Image (tube, helix red, strand yellow):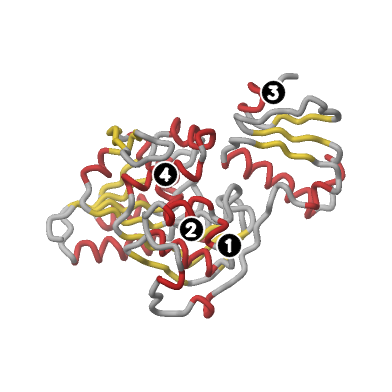
Amino acid sequence: RRGDQVLIKPNLLAPRSYKSGATTNPHIVAALIDLSRQLGAKRIIVGEGAAVGHDTEKAFDECGFRVLATDKQVELVDFKKSEFVPMSISNGRVLRRIRVPKELVDSDVIINVPVMKTHDVFPATLGLKNMKGIIPERDKKRFHSWGLSQCIVDLNKVALPQVSVIDGTIAMEGMGPAHGTPVNLGILISSFDTVAADTVASLVMGIDPQSIEYLRLASEQGLGCGIISEIEVRGLEVEEVKRKFSRLVLESGEFLKHGIRIIEEGACTGCRNTLSAVFSKLVSGDQIQLIGDTTFVLGQDAELLADFEGRLFKFGSCAKLICPG
């Protein structure tokens, strides 16, 4: 509506070009800015908080959003520097309160622009998951120990976007959400219902929506429609653009047959993705046997079995603090 404040939330998890498939295509955001202005938006903000350990300001530069903001004369906000406002979640299953940026609270419309990607924890990261980028880093880490899927759902109970535009121009498969392979898909999936958009996107990726826990929970808890037979799909049919996205799974048979055991509970994307990248390189170089008969432990809730034997590799600062030895 005329006079509205609009917040556009892309996915800029790290300083990587959109051509890698890791981050949102700035040309899409530029078009959304133009459309918002045509519809009467008074103030437009593009806001993001990069992944833990990454600099949002650098991501704005490397991903082309600094130039975009200057050209389009919109505000660029690093949520890591925002004033956070506590929000009550009366129907939260895990979260009862969460801090969100003031810019989000003050906005009339939230436009969510995630990238269609595979993920190291879930089969896919899409619209609902993208909203995790608004919260403080400390809470991002805590989500993994509190129950990531339900935390994502509870967050969206107070921060559900009015519009989600899933960027499938250049998507990502394999070691998503950061180190995977770009997929030149050339599509957009948009809806006023983020759950419906995520459901359609997962089917396009060849993934069962029910296998994405946060998406299933969101549908069950009334955040949107996750039943494809009840979703009206306009434009191209799912089958016309469907493509099976590959995904590297840490617990794959390739590792198990070499005696590589992985114990991970509450591990963040940073540790999981880094370990996945190492394993992938060893597999592609036919060198995975070099780390055979080794147990890798990662995550803040990981525990060793009492009868543990063999070589142990503690991966990440959380495992180092929790596991003895």
Using the numbered discs, state the Cα–Cα distance from disc 3 to disc 4 in whole angstroms.
Answer: 29 Å
User: The residue under label 2 is which amino acid type?
Assistant: Tyr
Q: Nearer the viewer, residue 195 or 59?
A: 195
Mark 4: few/some/many CA within 10 Å (<14, 14-19, 20+): many
Horizontal side of residue 97 vs 264, given as left or right: left
> Who comes first in sequence, dot 2 or dot 1?
2
Residue wearing tag 2: 18
Residue wearing tag 3: 323
SS state under label 4: helix
User: The residue under label 4 is which amino acid type?
Assistant: Gly
Between label 1 and label 4, give the one nearer the viewer.
4
Residue wearing tag 4: 133
Residue 6, percent across and down? 24, 53
Residue wearing tag 1: 182
SS state under label 3: loop
SS state under label 2: helix
Residue ID at (57%, 38%): 268
Horizontal side of residue 276 vs 41, given as left or right: right
> Who comes first in sequence, dot 2 or dot 3?
2
Residue 137 image label: none
SS state under label 1: strand
Residue ID at (16%, 54%): 4
Does residue 34 sit above or below 237 in this rendering? Answer: above
Q: The N terminus appears in which quarter of the rendering?
A: bottom left
Q: The C terminus appears in which quarter of the rendering?
A: top right
Mark 2: few/some/many CA within 10 Å (<14, 14-19, 20+): many
